[in-house]
Amino acid sequence: MAIKPARLNHGDTIAIIAPASAPPDPKAIDRSLEAIQHLGFKARLSPNVRKRWGFLAGTDRERAADLMKVFLDRKVKAILCLRGGYGTARLLPLLDYQAIRANPKILIGYSDITSLHCALLVRSNLVSFHGPMLNSDFLNKQVPPFTLQSFLRTLMQPFPAGSICSPRPAAEERAGKVSSVGALRKVNAPSILRRGIASGWLLGGNLSILCTTLGTTYQPTFKNRILFLEDLDEVPYRFDRMLTHLLNAGLLQQVSGIAIGVNKNCEDPKAKTAREYRQTVEDVFKERLLPLKVPIVMGLPFGHVPLNATLPLGVRATLDAKKGDLVINEPAVR
């Protein structure tokens, strides 16, 4: 069983790190402090969070040092990534996984942060959270209530978060300590590619980044997992290439079910004008995944989109491919 970090409470300190790329606008770092404080938490900037090194937010050692520092800081209760981009995988050999295991904390991020999620699960046996980040989510003027409620419910309450499609308001929000802006937006109905119900430990993230863990010491096990996938700006044939890579490695054949998020900007721009036949992303998923004969749901609310549910890696979940839902079955925090 994976190690669960302590729950987050209002007034706790959340550390801000930039393990990959720097934000395009340096002022976003200051605004991130305000965003966290607006949610009812204290915010702390990592020492090197303002650094830049080419396309990275500081050197590898600076970024790795920031991550280790906040894991070892007893006043810090959660670690929130400023953004993804590129470069997280460069930190993995520089981290002290035994020290992280001895000081478990909530870590939240997605996209390029998938590398870190896999490493923490494999090397530290730590539950971490695929969820909204500052630059892409919380710095928006109006964070969708759906995204905020999922974030608060998953990180602040030591009981199962339940359906990711129908988030209930967190207890703190119901009590008036935190307010969402506007009404809860309705989630578009997911598509069921293969019906059925499957349970297993949750694993996944960005498909492109997940593929880069193969053959490394940070590659997670796929056996009996509910695999969740999403990506950004990838055309259909690239999805085919990545899924084929996972199939050729014998990994997709081991999963219990597959939950696919919203793949933003992944249409083929030449499809309408091309004379030759072009597949859609859905076509690719059907062709490559249906032979696995496991439940598959597509279009679930997570990914590089405003409605971005918080998903805990390493906890039990059920993929309900009869209703079109992913249900978190156990608490992700203690």
Image (cartoon, rainbow, N blue to C red):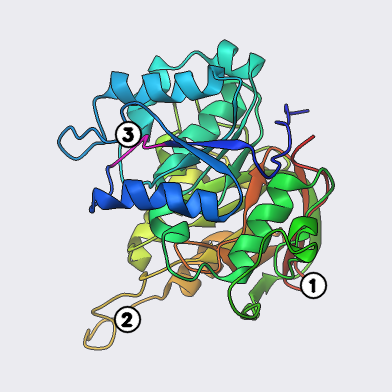
Label ID, residue 322: 1
Q: Is residue 141 above or below residue 152?
A: below
Q: Which residue is mark 3?
A: 49
Q: Position of residue 179 (x, y in %)?
A: 65, 66
Q: Is residue 274 left or right of residue 223?
A: left
Residue 91 covered by magenta stretch: no
Using the numbered discs, state the Cα–Cα distance from disc 2 to disc 3 in whole angstroms: 47 Å
Q: Position of residue 186 (x, y in %)?
A: 65, 81
Mark 2 or 3, closer to the camera = 3
Task: Look at the numbered discs 2 and 3 and tell me whether their residues touch, using CB distance below 8 Å.
Answer: no
Magenta-drawn stretch, dominant element (helix, strand or loop): loop
Inspect the image, locate mark 2, and give the three-letter code of the amino acid beneath it. Tyr
Residue in the foreground of this view, choosing between 234 and 159: 159
Q: Secondary structure at mark 1?
A: loop
Using the numbered discs, state the Cα–Cα distance from disc 1 to disc 3 in whole angstroms: 44 Å
Q: Residue at x 78, y 74 (%)?
A: 323
Q: Residue furthest left?
A: 54
Task: Count residues near mark 2 (Cα–Cα under 10 Å), then give few for <14, some for 14-19, many for 20+.
Answer: few
Instruction: Tell me which segment is drawn in magenta.
Output: 17-21
Inspect the image, locate mark 1, and give the three-letter code of the amino acid beneath it. Lys
Q: Residue at x 47, y 54 (%)?
A: 35
Residue in the foreground of this view, choosing between 69 and 264: 69
Q: Residue at x 53, y 33 (%)?
A: 118
Q: Is residue 220 above or below residue 329?
A: above
Label ID, residue 277: 2
Quarter of the image with the C terminus in it: top right
Q: Position of residue 27 (x, y in %)?
A: 27, 51
Q: Which callout, 1 or 3, points at the residue further toward the start of the chain?
A: 3
Quarter of the image with the N terminus in it: top right
Inspect the image, locate mark 3, and give the three-letter code of the amino acid beneath it. Val
Task: Count residues near mark 3 (Cα–Cα under 10 Å), then give few for <14, some for 14-19, many for 20+.
Answer: many
Classify residue 126 by image quadrant: top right
